[in-house]
């Protein structure tokens, strides 16, 4: 493993990454507040639960439709400028929501259309921002940087909705206004970023280069194995969609209990990400990753069989922590194993795998619960996760034997 440069081994000693991190925090909080306000406002306007599903749909479709163009842009143009442009678009769109909501001029269709525009910007921003991060710190520090970024995302997921709900008391326009200011702050921070290392020259864009990310993944067993493991493990092992059933019918608790159950995985993930940001994994990362995913499956089985609220809460906390270990390792492996010129396209594909696993995971849980019952559904998911771990260890021996997060040929 390459050693940190002379500037030290602390992320705080790299101003570019510090600005990037605070920009991700600001935009993460803004997006979580936006999600709460938009959902409440649309339901208040229509009183139809179906319309709440449309919010997720209009934000997911752009990432699906733009997966190849977004990665292509990230690999052929200045990533900092792309992220800056996307954040500015998000800021202006949410500012428009704030003004229109204050004047009561927006209906459901206009809100959904604005959210679609924000979804387009985020579909381009996310893979570009992920590909930008490795250029802002030395290679040896990137695992810590990945963990710190995950901590920021988890904090936004826990605190952002609460802040949005509290501010909504003053009106939807207040929430949108705060979110717009946060995006404006993120834009200023991104504008001030300077690269830690000079970006590599880009190849001329061609039709072949558009699909080069898919070709690269097929030829790299470590990258393909890491990304696909996330897809199938989360697809089979996710039980969060059924938490309302467990809370009411199995654990016999109320809405307050459901809130704690939903918060427990995020709390576990946040605690683990903070720990990993200070103590980066340096050895036997392949076995550790498979062990953490297997632990995720075992935790899912225990949760399915638990009738104790305290035990279920503890297991969900552990489940979130284990998932964070595998997520940080997978994310770092994908970024560091991928040459800089390919990171945008591979990050875009990775984003689709993650989004698809989350969306389809909830659908799979609901369908199997309808067919077999709630507890058998979650048990089946836990067993399926363990089967996936066993198969992936067999099919991807290079990933199973991986010792360090970064290959020496990509070390800086």
Image (cartoon, rainbow, N blue to C red):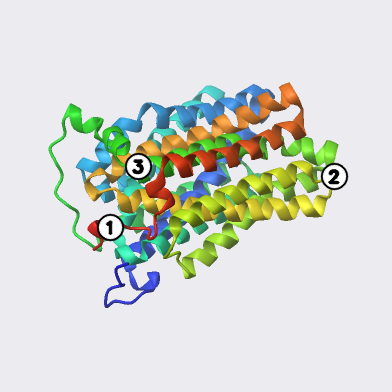
337 lies above or below 9: above
Dot 3 crowding, Cα within 10 Å, few <14, some 14–19, many 20+? some
Looking at the image, which is closer to me, 35 or 157? 157
Contact (Cβ within 8 Å) of mark 1 with mark 2: no
- Closer to the chain start, of discs 3 and 1, is 1
Coordinates of residue 340 in the picture (x, y in percent) = 24, 50
320 lies above or below 206: below
Occupied quadrant, residue 196:
bottom left
Q: Report, in whole angstroms, how far the alpha carbon at label 1 lies from the one at label 2.
A: 48 Å
- Closer to the chain start, of discs 1 and 2, is 1
Coordinates of residue 120 in the picture (x, y in percent) = 39, 33
The dot on residue 135 is 1
Occupied quadrant, residue 52:
top right
Q: Which residue is mark 3?
A: 221
**Number of numbered discs visible in the structure rendering:** 3
Residue at 23% across, 57% down: 409
Q: Which residue is mark 2?
A: 253
Dot 2 crowding, Cα within 10 Å, few <14, some 14–19, many 20+? some
Looking at the image, which is closer to me, 370 or 68? 370
Direction from residue 1 to residue 173 in the image, left or right: right
Contact (Cβ within 8 Å) of mark 3 with mark 1: no
Work out whether residue 105 can be spotted: no
Coordinates of residue 295 in the picture (x, y in percent) = 61, 51
State which quarter of the image contains the N terminus.
bottom left
Between circles 3 and 1, the one closer to the viewer is 3
Residue at 44% across, 50% down: 400
């Amino acid at each position: 493993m390459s050693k940190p440069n002379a500037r030290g081994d602390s992320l705080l000693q790299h101003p570019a990454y510090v600005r990037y991190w605070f920009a991700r925090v600001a935009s993460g909080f803004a997006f979580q507040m936006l999600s709460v306000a938009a959902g409440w406002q649309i339901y208040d306007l229509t009183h139809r639960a179906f319309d709440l599903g449309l919010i997720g749909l209009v934000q997911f479709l752009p990432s699906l439709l733009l997966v190849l163009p977004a990665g292509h842009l990230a690999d052929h143009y200045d990533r900092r400028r792309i992220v800056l442009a996307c954040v500015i678009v998000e800021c202006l769109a949410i500012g428009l929501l704030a003004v229109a909501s204050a004047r009561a001029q927006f209906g459901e269709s206009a809100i959904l259309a604005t959210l679609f525009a924000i979804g387009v910007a985020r579909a381009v921003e996310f893979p570009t921002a992920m590909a930008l991060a490795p250029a802002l710190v030395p290679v040896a520090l990137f695992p810590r940087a990945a963990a710190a970024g995950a901590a920021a995302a988890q904090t936004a997921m826990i605190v952002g909705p609460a802040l949005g709900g509290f501010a909504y008391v003053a009106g939807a326009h207040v929430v949108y206004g705060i979110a717009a200011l946060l995006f404006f702050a993120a834009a200023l921070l991104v504008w001030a970023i300077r690269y830690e290392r000079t970006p590599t020259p880009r190849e001329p864009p061609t039709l072949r280069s558009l699909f080069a990310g898919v070709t690269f993944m097929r030829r790299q067993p470590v990258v393909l194995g890491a990304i696909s493991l996330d897809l199938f493990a989360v697809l089979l092992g996710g039980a969060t969609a059924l938490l309302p059933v467990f809370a009411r019918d199995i654990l016999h608790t109320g809405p307050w209990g459901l809130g704690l159950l939903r918060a427990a995985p995020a709390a576990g993930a946040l605690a683990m990400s903070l720990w990993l940001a200070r103590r980066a994994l340096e050895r036997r990362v392949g076995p550790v990753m498979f062990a953490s995913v297997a632990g995720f499956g075992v935790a899912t089985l225990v949760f399915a069989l638990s009738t104790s609220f305290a035990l279920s809460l503890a297991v969900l906390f552990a489940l979130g922590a284990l998932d964070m270990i595998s997520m940080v390792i997978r994310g770092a492996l994908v970024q560091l194993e991928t040459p800089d010129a390919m990171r945008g396209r591979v990050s875009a594909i990775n984003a689709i795998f993650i989004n698809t696993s989350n969306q389809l995971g909830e659908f799979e849980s609901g369908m199997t619960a309808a067919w077999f019952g709630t507890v058998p559904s979650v048990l089946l998911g836990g067993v399926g996760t363990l089967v996936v771990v066993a198969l992936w260890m067999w099919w991807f021996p290079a990933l199973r034997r991986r010792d360090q997060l970064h290959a020496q040929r990509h070390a800086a």
